[in-house]
Image (tube, grey):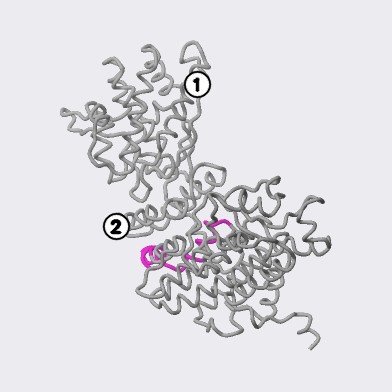
Amino acid sequence: MPTALTAHQQTISRIFSDDYVFQIPNYQRPYAWTIEQARDLFDDLIGFMNASPGEVENMPPYFLGSIVLIKKEDLPDADVVDGQQRLTTLTILLSALRTQAPEKDASDITHLIYERGSQIRGTQDRFRLSLRERDRSFFHSYVQREDGFKKLLELSDNLSDSQENIQNNARMFDERLRSLPEDERPRLAQFIVTRCYLVAVATPDLDSAYRIFSVLNSRGLDLSATDILKAEIIGGIAEAQREGYTTKWENTEEDLGRNSFGDLFSHIRMAYRKAKPQGTLLREFREHVTKNSAPDRFIDEILIPMADVYEELTDSAYASPERAESVNESLKWLNRLEFKDWVPPALAFAVRKRNSPEKMESFFKDLERLSYWMLVTRAGINERIDRYSRLTRAIEQEENLQATDSLLQLTKNEQWDIYAVLDGPIYDRLSARARSAVLLRLDALMSGGGAQYDYDTITVEHVLPQNPDAKSEWTSWFPDAAERVSLVHRLGNLALLTRKKNSSASNYEFGRKKSAYFTQGGISPFVLTTQVLKHDIWDPDVIQQRQSELMKKLEAHWRLEERKDPQEAFLE
């Protein structure tokens, strides 16, 4: 009876021997190591070898990490759960060494890459490593066969991303090896084969292999939760359908990009969990998402629809014959927030109502309003997660989101709270990112929409300086120091710049500040700043009048007319 787990430290000569026949399952992601990662491996090997002068057999061992396999103890066949990138890259490096080795050494290296068949024994060539089906024949032909490597270097046909990575790394290894002294190449080959080690961790089944995979992942190896979930989910699909669902999964991941794809899983977890996470993404995804959904249905009915919606939300690219511009305007401002907790309820709503433009428009206007209330009132993460989670539940239960008591709407007291912050010393109350978001939203409202803010740097600056010189015109316009302090951080005294702030320039007299600091070439791309340029003086009356005008804009847009002071409500 096979043991549940074996772990053996093996030399590369033992790894690439008859003891193992490595297979990359189709549910694994494609070969992804770039030149940078392959070069790092090569440089590490050369650096370690050169730091150990003398005979190779006397060098200390070099550890290349662990690989996780599904393998029965008495059979060589091994599905690679983790280790594809290293095994593939090592094979490419061995192939590169073979092309520059003497015939005898080249034959020895070939034996590490594949076992030659025998006509007398009736056996066929057996490759030590077989990639996923999409890349298998390419790898056999151009990397593992003796006559393939030089052809690989010259290929110019359209290649897939994984095949390009193979070719790029082969070219890099070829160039680096040619730059070595001739006697150093066989020394490097001997060092890799006899002094480099991998720990081969093997279990006989997928479940135990992925438990190990999860532990290794938690200890810092370059693995992701989505890789583990992919193997679990696709591994649970009937073999005849597995390749098709692997393609669906990988196409979805490629469309979003690896980082965004990982973010999507976190948002799906929250949409189903509807509470602050208490465990790892893996554990909670299993408990709250995949546990109640067949693997194929998860991909068809949850992952792909939510990925399509997620891309529209994060790119502000909702497509519809009508209302799309309005929806995308709201999405644009949601995406400027410093938190992403709004995404799960947005996903939950859009995946259900994306074909109803009027409902999409109404929902996202209200979600922008709710989310900026959280931003401006500095709601903590627990408060945000609780509110958005309860909103997600209300969406699932088809509650009336337009009702005054809906979790999507602001109460009269909440309207008061956001209004009070906006009408107060907002510069001092909000973080730099939050106040930029509010000022940019206000600028867009003042411009009537359509303004673009694609600048590398956008900062919020005071018109009246925070610390004006005692002899400047500022102090003559603001003789009352207390009044000056009460106005300096308010909306009416703020403008936007497309440059980093300059502490000395910020204290310029008003005329010089307008021409030398607030504009570039005499103009500003911001309506809020252009307003400032129209004034000849900047005194308390100007700030207060501007404050009133700007507050009316925000009040109308975020519908704050029904605000009610909670203290007054308490007294009633």
Residue at the image point whose x is 68% and y is 80% from the top: 563
Image x and y of residue 51, in percent: 53, 17
The amino acid pointed to by label 1 is: Gly
* Left or right: 281 in relation to 165: right
Residue at the image point whose x is 48% and y is 31% from the top: 64
* Closer-to-camera residue (86/407): 407
The amino acid pointed to by label 2 is: Gly
**Image quarter of the C terminus:** bottom right
Q: CA distance from mark 1 to mark 2?
A: 44 Å
**Image quarter of the N terminus:** top left
Image x and y of residue 459, in percent: 61, 53
Magenta region's main secondary structure?
Answer: helix
Which comes sooner in the sequence, label 1 or label 2? 1
Image x and y of residue 537, in percent: 69, 61
**Magenta region:** 280-304
Marks 1, 2: nearer the viewer? 1
State the residue position of label 1.
47
For mark 1, give the secondary structure: helix
* Closer-to-camera residue (354/234): 354
* Closer-to-camera residue (198/462): 462
For mark 2, give the secondary structure: helix
User: Is residue 559 depicted above or below 168 in this figure?
Assistant: below
Could you classify mark 2 by the number of other residues whose Cα lies within 10 Å: few (under 14), some (14-19), or many (20 or more)? few
Q: Is residue 356 magenta?
A: no
Indicate which disc residue 244 carries: 2
